[in-house]
Image: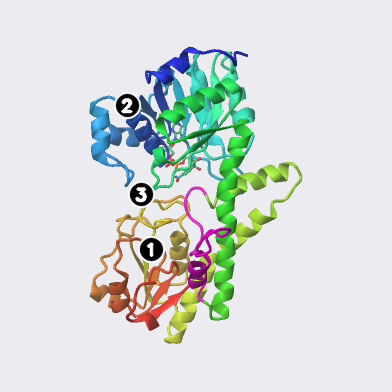
Amino acid sequence: MSTEGSVPLEKAIADKTAIIGIAGLGYVGLPLIRAFVAAGFRTMGFDVDQTKVDRLLAGESYIEHIPSDWIGKCIADKTFEPTADMSRMKEADAILICVPTPLSDSRDPDLTYVEDTTRTIAKTLRPGQLVALESTTYPGTTRDVMLPILEKSGLKVGKDFYVAYSPEREDPGNPNFSAEKIPKVVGGIDALSCRLACALYSHAVVDAIPVSSCEAAEACKIVENTYRSVNIAMVNELKMLFDRIGIDVWEVIDAAKTKPFGFQAFYPGPGLGGHCIPIDPFYLSWVARRVGMATRFIELAGEVNMSMPQYVIHQLQEALNESAKSIRGSKICLLGVAYKKDVDDMRESPSLELMEMLLNRGAELTYNDPHVPKLPTLRRYDMSHMESVELTPEFLASQDCVLIATDHTAYDYADIVKHAQLVIDTRNATKQVTEGREKIRKA
Ligand SMILES: NC(=O)c1ccc[n+]([C@@H]2O[C@H](COP(=O)([O-])OP(=O)(O)OC[C@H]3O[C@@H](n4cnc5c(N)ncnc54)[C@H](O)[C@@H]3O)[C@@H](O)[C@H]2O)c1
């Protein structure tokens, strides 16, 4: 295996003549393209969704924090070439895979997208190419699942081509941490693969941190997300306890975080959302089951976090009950369908579950979200007839209850509380509101 000395790809990376191909042009892939273009590379974007490719070719962004102007400019100057023609993968010197890694219905890892993409790459794999997986997955995926598919091409890793794993840490909508500002952990199948991948990423992001193997890098990403899931579950549980004994959990967390060491603030909410935190820890549970172990922290955190929508509905029911009302027949407007503030992403959003629970209980339900004007057809929920309503004072006053599920910055919370009859606040979004606090119930 040629782990010593320089290989042509190293020079192409150093002088930025290497063409970077990104497979999967979603929330992770597009920002990564932007980071490589900003670093001075020519990029190609591959996606099986022809509609996305067509929109990009027309200079149109479908991700809120990636401006259309920027797409148009890159298409015009050819620094970004989107295509659904996978045979063109042979033109890229490095191919970075950013495709979905969901859970199956039985909550097992679903690697279909990773396997399909790898098979496509294998069809045109040529000597000198670097293939790096970025999708979140369990330790062992790159070596045990991807590598055998790639080597079916007849080429040998370390000699003919290179393979690495580098987890994406994108935080969509976070103005302080765009892709290029987030360090990347890199693990290679061998030392040369790791060196090449580190060299490549260090052009595009602030730092590339090598670890000893793909498995260490894969585990690193899952540890990061499990850490969040477990800590969020803890504060969610404490929220329920503190509510019962008359203590405001948000006040306690804000006080605790004044400790300059040993405490990191996590906040309760209506449940977990997004593509990562509700899903990734279960990739690790699956690995544990295979080796005869249980991951009790992960399971417990999942259980607590998944029970949160139920808790919110219970609180809402209690609050309506105080005015002799039931959920059935009540006008309820949910604010924020995106899974977190200031984004338009609804994947796994607890708001959708809350909406479904309210509809099942007979509420006259509406929603508002400045980032989601209309609900698309979703895998688990069909609410595609619903459109975001305007929050006029008259509309707010006509509602039996306003349920704040996501604390978008665009909302005028004082105005919402002023006009609403009852506000259920799952995010402490009304923290600064001074007038009408008797109408607010935290949940
Ligand atoms: N969204 C996040 O904030 C985030 C953060 C860190 C890590 N991740 C991880 O990154 C990965 C991608 O997530 P995402 O949010 O960008 O997903 P996404 O759904 O936004 O984008 C994935 C894209 O891949 C395309 N695709 C599917 N199969 C393909 C194939 N065979 N070839 C080419 N393209 C294909 C889809 O059409 C889609 O456009 C996941 O593993 C996720 O867990 C996501």
At mark 2, the secondary structure is: strand
For the record, the magenta segment spans: 248-276
Which image quadrant for residue 393? bottom left
To which residue does mark 2 refer?
81
To which residue does mark 3 refer?
175
Q: Residue at x 52, y 27 (%)?
A: 118
Judge depth for marks 1 and 2 and give the one in front.
Answer: 1
To which residue does mark 1 refer?
407
Asked if residue 330 lies left or right of residue 315, the reply is left
Q: How many marks?
A: 3
Question: Which of the marked residues, 1 or 2, is nearer the chain's N terminus?
Answer: 2
Question: Which of the marked residues, 3 or 1, is nearer the chain's N terminus?
Answer: 3
* Ligand 1 neighbours mark 2 (CB distance < 8 Å): no
Three-letter code, disc 3: Pro
Secondary structure, magenta segment, majority class: loop
Three-letter code, disc 1: Asp
- The quarter of the image that holds ligand 1 is top left
Is 274 magenta? The answer is yes
Q: Residue at x 47, y 36 (%)?
A: 99
**Rendered location of residue 166, percent (x, y):** 52, 34
